[in-house]
Image: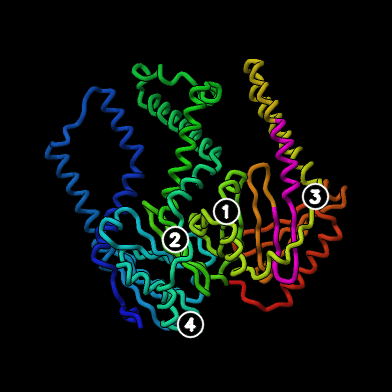
Amino acid sequence: MSAFNFETASRQSAKGIIVIFGVSTFKVLRGSLIIFAALILKYFSSDKFPNLLNLKFILIAVGIVLFFLALATLRYLNFKFYVNHKYFFLQKGIFNKEEVSVSTAKIQNVYIKQNLLQQLINVVSLSIETAGDDKTEIEIMALSRPKAQALKSLLLLSSNENESKATERLKETVYFRASVKKLVLEGISENHFKSLVLIFAFIIGLYNNLKEFVYQLDLTSRFGSWFQLDGESVMTLLLFNLSIVGLLLILAFLLSLVRMFIQNFNLTVKRNSEGLEISKGLLNKINLSLSAHRIQNTTIITNRLKQLFGLYKLAFTQAMANKKQQQNFNIVGLGKTQISELLQQFYPNAEERLIKNKPSKYLMIRLLVRSAIIVVIINGLLAFGPIIVFLVNIPLILYIIVNANFAYKKAYYHVDNDYIVVGGGQLIETTTKYLEIKKIQAVSFNQSIFQKRRDLASIVIYTASKSLTIPHIDTNIALSIKNYLVFKVESENKDWM
């Protein structure tokens, strides 16, 4: 029996005023960052700076704080929620009153989150997501953790569950906890190229923004000499200065390591008959439940270095629209035995049935052609540089050939009465995707003019969260698979969510 009565309307914790005020203030400051930067540059160029201790500035600052505090208080007072007859009701609004009702049967997931401010004042937020929405529909920003857990359990109860089962689920033992060592090894074995691209984009974006400020505020006499290069010149400077490249590689490595640690700090997985409960995060803590019947696709991800460390990542997708939350369904640091155990839970006997059918070698040819186009574009960009820069083609072409070869070697597909399994990857990364046939929403038979000449086709399988492709297989086999999957979809009446 829950200690909380959710049938009568209740408010958030009174600490919600602080959270609402903090979030509103942060959004305003973030949106006004460019304005503040322009004002600072303006005052800096005129050798004058406002006296922040002036009574006028103090009164303006106090007035702004009181205004946002009053708004936060009104939002808190007008925010009420309750659960009644399998519906969650929410009342909110200051001037325009609004009431939202959501059937508990339509709820895809309930997240318990905690940002840095919420950690400091010891409250959590609870977000409710339903399939088909563009964003999180409902967020209660300040609840005590026990109350949030009780509300989460109540909202996720199915029609045949009762409160005793929900209570038992919360008390289950930990199945997996990622140690600091595993997180460090995961960070070391990450794709640092992605982090390097982010750093390049950040540096060039920051450079161009500052350059624009200097020209718009007519500060060229003071700072113009700092911005003589255009974006392409900055990229060339970064790429061909070995010391800068070395420094950026180190920064990319550290960025991958820090990002992995922050996102997956204290990663804990609880296992139960209904699925998994995942908790993780340092600055933004999150707790979510992953039910087996709501899972749409499952992907096993690893790479050569991760395999050396014995590490695998399990990524799940659900029928939800808030794509930012998808990364929260990733479990890193798993071993091969744990992967097999979880696959057995969600896809019973799938590994034992697996038969690896190979696609056509056209897959490799197509990848080589696409890569050749990219090489031509790169050489076009380097055409105005010194001849020596064309030496980059040697390792680039070698990588493309080896990568295409591995892409074909790792590609396979499997279809049986219950599951579809598609393997893939390239030189470094390896992926294996699992899908239950009963989760299929639609099937598409695709055949380009190049495939038709080779009597090949691709099958695209759509679910409520993402699509899965079986690429470049014999036309007759593709038609057989398509017809079989359409028959299964039309003839079976199984829940897909």
User: As drawn, is 311 to the left or to the right of 55?
Assistant: right
Marked residue nearer the N-terminal end (1 or 2): 2
Residue type, label 3: Ser
Label 3 to label 2: alpha-carbon separation? 46 Å
- Residue 53 placement (x, y as % from top left): 13, 36
Look at the numbered disc 2 and give the secondary structure of its residue: strand
Marked residue nearer the N-terminal end (3 or 2): 2
Label 4 to label 2: alpha-carbon separation? 25 Å
Mark identifier at residue 312: 1
Mark identifier at residue 268: 2
Disc 4 target residue:
161
Tell me the residue at 19%/31% (across/down).
50
Tell me the residue at 35%/83% (across/down).
1
Q: Which residues are magenta?
A: 397-423
Look at the numbered disc 1 and give the secondary structure of its residue: strand
Tell me the residue at 43%/48% (across/down).
261
Note whether residue 130 is visible: no
Q: Residues within 10 Å of mark 2 (few under 14, many from 20)?
A: some
Look at the numbered disc 4 and give the secondary structure of its residue: loop
Q: Residues within 10 Å of mark 3 (few under 14, many from 20)?
A: few
Numbered disc in front, either 3 or 2: 2
Picture quadrant where residue 194 is located: top right
Name the one closer to the observer, 46 or 122. Answer: 122
Numbered disc in front, either 4 or 3: 4
Above/below status of 245 relative to 483:
above
Tell me the residue at 38%/78% (across/down).
83
Determine if the magenta segment contains residue 415. Answer: yes
Disc 3 target residue:
448
Picture quadrant where residue 339 is located: bottom right
Marked residue nearer the N-terminal end (1 or 3): 1
Residue type, label 2: Thr
